[in-house]
Image (tube, helix red, strand yellow):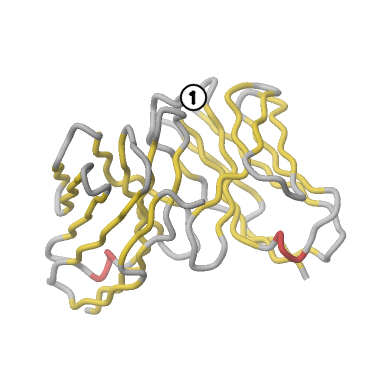
Amino acid sequence: SQQGEEDPQALSIQEGENATMNCSYKTSINNLQWYRQNSGRGLVHLILIRSNEREKHSGRLRVTLDTSKKSSSLLITASRAADTASYFCATNTNAGKSTFGDGTTLTVKP
Amino acid sequence: SQTIHQWPATLVQPVGSPLSLECTVEGTSNPNLYWYRQAAGRGLQLLFYSVGIGQISSEVPQNLSASRPQDRQFILSSKKLLLSDSGFYLCAWNGGFAYNEQFFGPGTRLTVL
């Protein structure tokens, strides 16, 4: 079964706006990761946040983690048309393997 | 630097035919290797992973098998394809379970007719 579930399933915004995607999970985790996938391509790792961290930044990306609510959010600021892609969260437990959600499809209109 | 290759990029096969997808990694040794399947508009389902040569763990019962004949080679196979085997197959590697970030190949689009 899926550990992570992203919300919304699809998001459409104008260039320059911020995009926020959420991920909820069910069991305790060691860390949570966000990946990006362009259509028909492999996934690219964006950022990892550990269970003892609450917020992390990387360029225009901001990730938060709330372990009490078992949720994470990915914020992309000042979006660009090139940010159009699907975004997936993946959780890791002590077993080490990653479990992926179904993703959020982001469309940024120029 | 490390690179990961998958081939073929696309494949159209009839039901009942065999399958062999190959994945190779360069620039690293003794990686963990993973095979995922992605249905249209969905997330990734882990099919197999390997922590070393000849060591294969299966995550879900299915019509597929995997082998790791060399340290940096991972093969996904089937003796007889089913319609339900259609999908996007992704190979990935990382340095081990302690290295959570995974590096993905470009994927193989398989259509079974």
Q: Quadrant of the N terminus of chain B?
A: top left
The quadrant holding residue A93 is: top left
Name the subunit of mark 1.
B
Residue A105 is drawn in which quadrant? bottom left
What residue appears at the point 45 percent right and 26 percent down from the top-left corner? B97
Q: Secondary structure at mark 1?
A: loop
Residue at position x 54%, y 20% from top? B30
Front-lying residue, B74 or A63: A63
Percent x, y for residue A58?
17, 45
A101 and B111: which is toward the camera: A101
In the image, residue B41 lies at what x, y percent? 49, 68
Q: Residues within 10 Å of mark 1 (few under 14, many from 20)?
A: some
Q: Residue at x 61, y 55 (%)?
A: B108
**Left/right of residue B4 with respect to residue A53 in the rendered view:** right
Q: Nearer the viewer, residue B83 or A67?
A: A67
- Residue B57, above or below A75: above
Report which residue position mark 1 lands on.
Answer: B28
For badge 1, the amino acid type reads Thr
Which residue corresponds to the image point at 22% horizontal and 55% vertical from the top-left?
Answer: A74
Name the image quarter holding the C terminus of chain B: bottom right
Residue A44 image point, x, y percent: 38, 48
In the rendered image of this protein, does residue A8 appear above or below residue B53? below
A104 vs B49, left or right, is: left
Of the pair B101 and B2, the residue shown nearer to us: B101
Label count reads 1
Residue A24 at x, y = what percent?
31, 54
